[in-house]
Amino acid sequence: MLRSFFLIILLGSLTHKKAFAQSTPSTPTDTTEKHLKAIEEMPEYPGGTEALYRFIIENLQYPSRSNKKGIQGTIYLSFIVELNGEITSIRIVKSVEGGAELEQEAIRVIGLMPRWKAGTVDGKPARAQFTLPIKYVLTENHAGRRKRSGN
């Protein structure tokens, strides 16, 4: 039985109402304490949200074993956009049962991304955490068969 899949990137989760960046204090006597400041301008993928979607759709592959087992659902990834726009600290925040292959593929693709435009605090580049959900959905590829929807 042939299956295809749809990749859905959840729009609402890409924008944060409030995000924070870490900065070190300017006083030399207090060098170990870190402060959190609200991000004024969120990090942005080069070309914007539509370009981000295109990149993920063009690069993400549905792992064959997960496809055969019918494993689907939403994988939430978190990563840091560094001062220079580099993506670091990619990790899974939430997954689906049996989704180890889906997680690995999502991490692989996020790791391939080009540098982003960094977020800003007080008009200066700032490190920022970003959360991105990727939803894997399997559908039947035969005419007259019902679609399988994701969780």
Image (tube, rainbow, N blue to C red):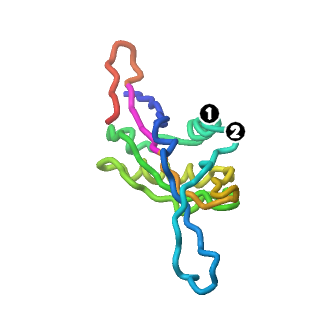
* Secondary structure of residue under mark 2: loop
The region drawn magenta spans: 133-139
Quadrant in the picture for the C terminus: top left
Residue 117: mark: none
Q: Residue type at mark 2?
A: Gly
Alpha-carbon neighbours of circle 2 within 10 Å: few (<14), some, or many (≥20)? few
17 and 26: which one is in front?
26
Q: Residue type at mark 1?
A: Glu
**What's the residue at 34%, 29% (across, down)?**
149
**What's the residue at 67%, 50% (across, down)?**
116
Q: Say left or right for 79 vs 99.
A: right
User: In the rendered structure, are the residues bearing label 2 and label 1 in contact, judged by CB atoms less than 8 Å apart?
Assistant: yes
Q: Position of residue 45 (x, y in %)?
A: 64, 45
Q: Is residue 55 above or below residue 76?
A: above
* Secondary structure of residue under mark 1: helix
**What's the residue at 54%, 53% (across, down)?**
108
Q: Where is residue 38 in the image (x, y as percent from the top left)?
A: 54, 56
Q: Is residue 6 above or below residue 115?
A: above
Residue 47: mark: 2
**Dominant secondary structure (helix, strand or loop) of the stretch shown in magenta:** strand
Q: Mark 1 points at which residue?
A: 50
1 and 5: which one is in front?
5
Q: Is residue 21 above or below residue 15?
A: below
